[in-house]
Structures are given as C-alpha cells and as structure tokens.
Image (cartoon, rainbow, N blue to C red):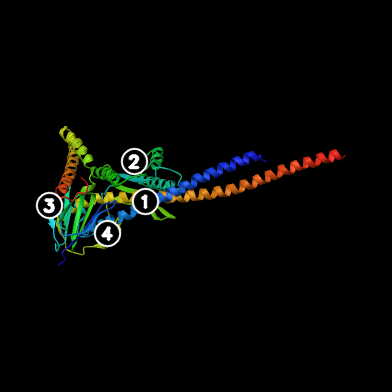
Amino acid sequence: MAKELRLEIVTPDRLVVSSDVEYVGAPGVLGEFGVLPGHVPFLSALGVGNLHYNKGGKTYFVFVSGGFAEVSGDKVTVLAEVAERAEEIDVERARRAQERAKERVSKQQEAIDNARATAALQRAMARMSCRNAAQGAGTCSMS
Amino acid sequence: MPSLKDVELKIAAVKKTKQITKAMNMVASAKLRNAQSRIERFRPYADKFYEMLGSLAAGADSSIHPLLEVREEIKTSLIVLVTSDRGLCGSFNGGLITMALKLAREKAAQGKTVKFVCMGKKGRDTVKKSGYEIVAAFADQMGSFDYTVALKLGMDVINGYINGDFDEVNLVFGKFISIPRQESTTLTILPMVADSVEGVEAAGPTQEYLYEPSVEGLLAELLPRFVNVQLYRGMLDTSASEHAARMRAMDNATRNCDDMVGTLTLVYNKARQASITRELMDIVGGTEALKG
C-alpha cells in the first residue's frame, strides 16, 4: 500500500494544488470526510468550507466552494469552481463581504435573495476560518 | 495629375495607418497566446468533469433531473450568442451574428418565440436592431473575464430554464480550431442530451464508486455546473478566435498598406519626373530664346 496520496485541486482557471500528501480532509455535503492512502473509490460533492491536507508533519488549508472530490486508487482529484490556498485569501475582502452579507441577511426580503445572502455569508466566514486555521497551524506564509 | 505635396501627405498617412495595424497585430497575437493558455489551463478541469459526468450519467435515467428532461412542446427558444466587444477583426462577428439570426429565423418559422442572451457588444447591438427580445446582455466583459462571469450567465440560463421561461437553449460561439481556422458553431446546451457531450458516453463506469450523497444527488450538483462549463468553454473559445481573427485582419491590413505605399510611391515619382521635365523644358526654351 502506498504511503502517500496524490492530491490535485483544479479550478476552471488554474491548477491550485498538485502534491503528494499523507492525508486529506474535505468538507463533503454530508459532513467532513477524511481520506488516507488505500481509500475505496469514492465520489462526493463538496460543500463550502476548508479542505486540509497533511504533508511533512504540517497541515495546509485550502478554501473550496462548489466542488467535487474523486478518490480513485491513491489519487484524490478535487474539482472546484473556486479554490484558494490559505495564503491567497484576501482577508480584507472576505471581511467586507461578511459585513455586507450580514446586513443583507438581517433585512427582510424575498426568500431567494435571502438564500444568496446566506450563501455569501457562509463563503466569507469559511474563507476567514480557513485563513485563521492556517495561521494557527503555521502554514500561512504571510502574516 | 495630383500635386507632389498631395501624394507625399498621402504616403505619410498610409505609413501611419500601417504602424497602427502592425501594433494591433502584435497586441492581438500576445492576447491570443494568453487566451490559448487559458484554454489549456481549463482543459484539465473540463476533462475531469466530462469523465465524472460520464461515469455517473451511464447508469442514470433521464427523468431524474429537470435539466435532462426533453420537453414535449417547445414554445420558447433561447439563443446565447457570444461575440466580441470590439470590431476590426474581419468577418468574425459578422459570421457569428449571421449564424445566430439564421437560427432565430428557423426557430421562429417553427412557431417558437425566440429570445436572446448576448455576451459581447457586437452581438447585442445587432440583435437589438433585429427586434428579438434580449433577456440579458453582458458587455465589456470579453476583455478580461473569469469563471464568475460564466457562473452569472449560467445562473440566468438555468433559472430561466427551470422556471419555464424557455424550453431549449442553444449556444452560438466561435470555436477555436487553430490560428488560421475558427468556426462559428451552434451547440445545444439544454435540454442536455447525451450526444451533445463529446466523449461522455464513451467513458462509462470503469470502477465501482461509493457515491455521496446519492447518484441522483450528485447529478443534481453536477448538471447545472456542466452548463457553466460549456458556457465558459464557449467564451474562452470565442475570445481566442476573436484574437486570431483580428491578427489575420491586421496582417492583411498591413500588407495592403505596403501595397498602397508602393503604388503611391510610383505616382509620386511620376509626378516628380513630370515636374522636372517641365522645368527643363522651360530652361531649354529660355536659353533658345536668348540665343535667337
């Protein structure tokens, strides 16, 4: 059994991560799941949240939204509409987005607008928590 | 016979135009390289997506998702027309618009109402004049767009389709084949039929997967995104085609400028010679008169 997994995270615009890792934890729609080498073939939709992987004793974090994960052999492929490594996240922008979204959620409005605002809020919060987690783990190169 | 000064000015003007067309050619070729590399970068995502969809759709029934269902009566047809924002690229936009309007006339002849979504200024302006209803228009996006534009466009299309605002969706875009070859292409996006998806049928399930949530649940997530993938591909292709077409148009223009400078130089020389001859005649005439 191989000791490592090949993790690839692709978005429509680029390849975000391509690396050999020891463990992948991903935010599935039905809850978080973990993948170790030797996992059964598995296909799952991902929710909005943080994907993390362990490599060389460190944990790295990636924000994903609107994605799918495929585990096949010792390869994990994540397709996401949006994926950002923790150090790439624009914290200022996320904070502003969070404030805007909060304001919109608090107003009474049509269900669909409310759903959008809630989703935006969720994304902003996930981005911030991703950055915080990475800082906590010491894998965020910028301060 | 034009005067020497006139011809001189004209030559200078043509040379200036040539400088501009040459510069535009170079800009277009740089942008084309950029657009091509974006297509390259999109490919892994798209390929993987087709593969996933293929292994899922193999066992699925077409009634499980509204986007797969073929409606019996098609009343309204939506055409998504992707063109460029700027001209000066030969017949590129013209070809796309002609194709879209022809398709619209065909659909109208079948008694369907035709609506448009326009991406890019050129298409929007022409469609507006032709009197079809425009549901949504995006302008000034083709210069620098990313996936979020496709998401926005995709959301409009999917919501409209599910609400029954239109019963079928066609995409007209400039397919990029190679630098000298682009083709105006029509692609049926909705309802999704297996053969509109190149290679999906062939993929088939290779491995038994565990699915989470269920196959149906996954399809419900994948299918709307597939619309976005196709729209994005259409946009990327159109953008690359636009630059390739502009490059060719500018190349031709530069060559034409060269030809024109050549002809004008000939005219200039003729005029110059004529004036020299005239002056000589005068001098010779003068000396003859003095001698006498």
Outermost residue to the bottom? A1
Q: Which residue is mark 2?
A: B138
Q: Position of residue B48 (x, y in %)?
A: 25, 57
Q: Toward which corner of the image does residue B142 lie, by quadrant? A: top left
The chain ID associated with circle 1 is B
Q: Secondary structure at mark 4?
A: helix
Q: Distance from label 2 to label 1 (Cα)?
A: 19 Å
**What kind of element bears circle 2?**
strand
Q: Name the residue carrying label 3.
A: A32
Tag 4 residue: B200
User: Mark 2 and mark 3: span between their CA atoms?
Assistant: 38 Å
In the picture, measured across the screen, residue B264 lies left or right of residue B216, that is right
Numbered label attached to residue B35: 1
Instruction: Give the residue type at disc 1.
Output: Ala
Q: Chain of mark 4?
A: B
Kind of residue indicated by mark 4: Val
- Measured as percent of width and height from the top left, residue B6 is found at 62, 39
